[in-house]
Amino acid sequence: MEPQRRLHLRPALIAWAVACLIALAVAWHFMAETPQAGGPPLEIRWHGNGIILQGEVRDVETQRALAEGAAAWLGGEADQVVDWLDIVPSALPVADAAALAELIRLGQEGWHLQRRPKDGWLAVQSLSDERSAKARALLHAAFGPGVSMELVALP
C-alpha cells in the first residue's frame, strides 16, 4: 500500500476505535444504572441469627419500618438486623411499608423474598398453610396490584 494512502486510513481507524469506546462506555453506564446489575432491587432473608435487608427503598420511613419489623421478629434484637438498604428516590415503590413490615414479623426461618421491577417471589416452607396464605395477602398489599408476587416452595 502506498505511504500516502496509509496516512488516510489512520484517521478513519482512530475515529472508528473512538466510536467503539464511546459505545462501550455508554452501554456500561446504562448497565450499571439498572437494578438487575447488582442483584434484586429488594431482598429480605430470614435466618436463625438475624434478618438481612438488602437493596433499595425510596425513603427513610420505609427503611425504618422494615428494620423495625425485622427487629420485632428477632424479639427486639436490632443488632441482629443486617440493614444493607440504600435510600434511593428512584427505587421501586413499596405501596404499603407497614404490610411489608408485618410480613417480616410473620416470616419464618429460611424464608427469602426477592422483589424485581415487575414481579418477585417469597420462598416459604409450605404453600398451603395459614401462615403462607397470610403472607400472600401481605405481599399483595405491600407491593400493590401492579407487581406480580408469588409464593414458591423452599427446596
Image (cartoon, rainbow, N blue to C red):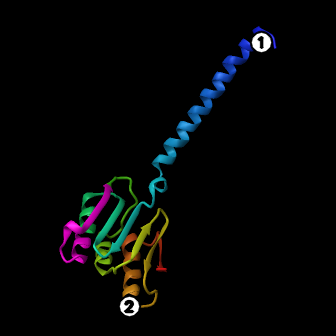
- Give residue 129's position: percent from left, percent from top: 41, 91
Is tag 2's residue or tag 1's residue first in the polypeptide sequence? 1
Q: Is residue 81 magenta?
A: yes
Q: Amino acid at mark 1?
A: Arg
Q: Front-most of 4 and 101?
A: 4
Kindly identify the amino acid type of the residue bearing the numbered disc 2. Glu
Give the x, y percent position of residue 131: 36, 87
Q: How packed is label 2: few (under 14 Cα within 10 Å), some, or many (20 or more)?
A: few
**Mark 2 and mark 1: span between their CA atoms?**
79 Å
- Looking at the image, which residue is at 48% across and 53% down? 37
Secondary structure under tag 2 reads helix
> For the residue carrying disc 1, how many other residues have a C-alpha within 10 Å: few (<14), some (14-19), or many (20+)?
few
| Rendering quarter of residue 19 | top right
**Residue pictured at 33% horizontal, 79% vertical:** 107
Against 60, residue 65 (above or below) is below
The range drawn in magenta is 68-86
Q: Is residue 133 above or below residue 92?
A: below
The answer to whether 146 is drawn above or below residue 127 in the figure is: above
Residue 120 spot, x, y in % from top left: 47, 70
**Extreme residue toward the right, this view:** 1
Seen as rendered, the residue at the extreme front is: 49
* Residue ID for mark 2: 130
The residue singled out by tag 1 in the image is 5
47 is within the stretch colored magenta:
no
Q: Residue furthest left?
A: 76
Q: State which quarter of the image contains the N terminus.
A: top right
Whether the residues at callouts 2 and 1 have beta carbons within 8 Å, the answer is no
* SS label for mark 1: helix
